[in-house]
Amino acid sequence: MSLRTLNIVLVGMVVVFAVLALLIICIRIYSAIISKFSNKNTNSDRNNFRTNDVQRTEIAETIVVNNTSTVQNGLNPELIAVIASAIAAIMGGSSDGFKVKSIKRIGHTTPIWNVAGRNEYILTKL
Amino acid sequence: MWQDFVNAISDLIQESGFANMTPLHIVMIVIACVFLYLAIAKKYEPLLLVPISFGMLAANLPLGELMHPELWDATPLDFGAILHEGGLFDLLYLGVKLGIYPPLIFLGIGVMTDFGPLIANPKSLLLGAAAQFGIFGTYLGAMALGNFTEKQAASIAIIGGADGPTAIWLTTKLAPELLGPIALAAYSYMALVPVIQPPIMKALTTNKERQIVMEQLRPVSKTEKILFPIIVTLITVLLIPSSAPLIAMLMLGNLFRESGVVGRLSETAENALINIVTIFLGLTVGATASADKLSQPGFGLKALAIILLGLIAFSVGTATGILFGKLMCWITGGKVNPLIGSAGVSAVPMAARVSQKVGQESNPQNFLLMHAMGPNVAGVIGSAVAAGVLLSMVG
């Protein structure tokens, strides 16, 4: 086996790793910048809520209106709106009489039949 | 009267394909029928294997004049002769020869790919890189065999990228004479991922490792998803210019998807365009596997070696992905399930589904699919980069 062959293998692997490692660094940097900017927006929104009691009582709606692109703790405004709408539908179709104060993700509670269904679907795709 | 009738029938038979059929033609037709069986009855990558195997069948019918291999063997290529004397498949093959179809397929793949899991966990790019060792390991093996030139060895090695369009793109640039067997091996092994990978994955991991439940991925904002294709194109193409056709088109497709402002273009790229190009690509790649090639001395042996080396490439890529996954598992204190490493060989989304399936055999409550999609799509970028590197070093 020639030295050139070994050289191609070595250089090839190093270059592939280097390019993808550089991409990791870039993704981390721009993700951090974007998250910093969105956090700033969120903080300024929160300050606004504190100075206005009316806005505080309608926190879910305010987040949806003022901060449409922010994603925090796994909850984006669209998801909050969907959950609030679902509650409203169950309560009789009106948004009066309740307020969404917090949304927490609970543990893994998927019924076993749902899990079995998903698994079966994935197996049919193999 | 009777004599005229007999003569006419006799002439018709003499001018028919039956009279001009050689044993090699029959061998090629049988091979084409085997692949058709695998595609239709066994459903092995039918979207590609059906046009490929039918292209092989049609091009090997004597006097059909669909494809003229002699026109493509000329150096330098006489495009005037191809346009004037070429058959239907010759004209369609121009898209393969000029490297047009694979990047167009990448455009459609870009629209269909969600890079969210990769952006949420950028470390998975390293798993996509580790699995590319299959490519370079096989290059080493092909060169050690001594039967192949550098360019042929590089084209065979790219089968380990588990990415059909990339394999076709690189092979047309480096070793077009091997396009048929390489394309067939690449797509056949991609279909066999659920058979090839699980034994390797199980052999290299412990049951405890396979049970690891990974943390849920963070949500990725729309801005991050829009910036991703732009940044990847800038960095990758500036570093490896020869990877530009594949990476640029892949990322353009993804920008179509994520920008959300070109719905019509996205829809065309992921449906009509990719389907049309797949038909042309499959038919013409299959048509390159002609009986004339098989009659060349040593070609059959080379085709067998390609099939064997392709299997080695896939297996080595899977193994190195898993081993790197184990390394990441050890470094992170058990937060990474090594099974997602095997998805780094591309074959989107089949390899990720295999990680999910094998993981769930050890822990039925475990859902690795989204975690495995990160290395899986990273593998597409990794194999395109590896193809670019090989092209610039060997081409």
Image (cartoon, rainbow, N blue to C red):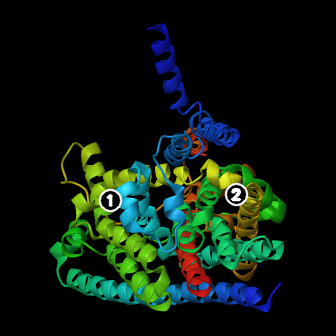
Which residue is pictured at 49% across the width and 61% down the height? B71
Label 1 residue SS? helix
Residue A6 at what x, y percent from top left?
76, 87
* Callout 2 touching callout 1 (CB < 8 Å): no
Residue A61 at what x, y percent from top left?
21, 66
Residue type, mark 1 in image:
Ala
- Residue B206 in the image: above or below residue B3: below
Residue B202 at what x, y percent from top left?
80, 58
- Residue B113 is at least partly visible in this image: no
Residue under pointer 2 = B296
Residue B244 at what x, y percent from top left?
43, 80
Give left or right: position of B268 versus A28.
Answer: left
The chain letter for the residue carrying disc 2 is B
Which residue is pictured at 29% across the width and 82% down the height? A42
Most foreground residue, B299 or B76: B76
Q: Nearer the viewer, mark 2 or mark 1?
A: 2
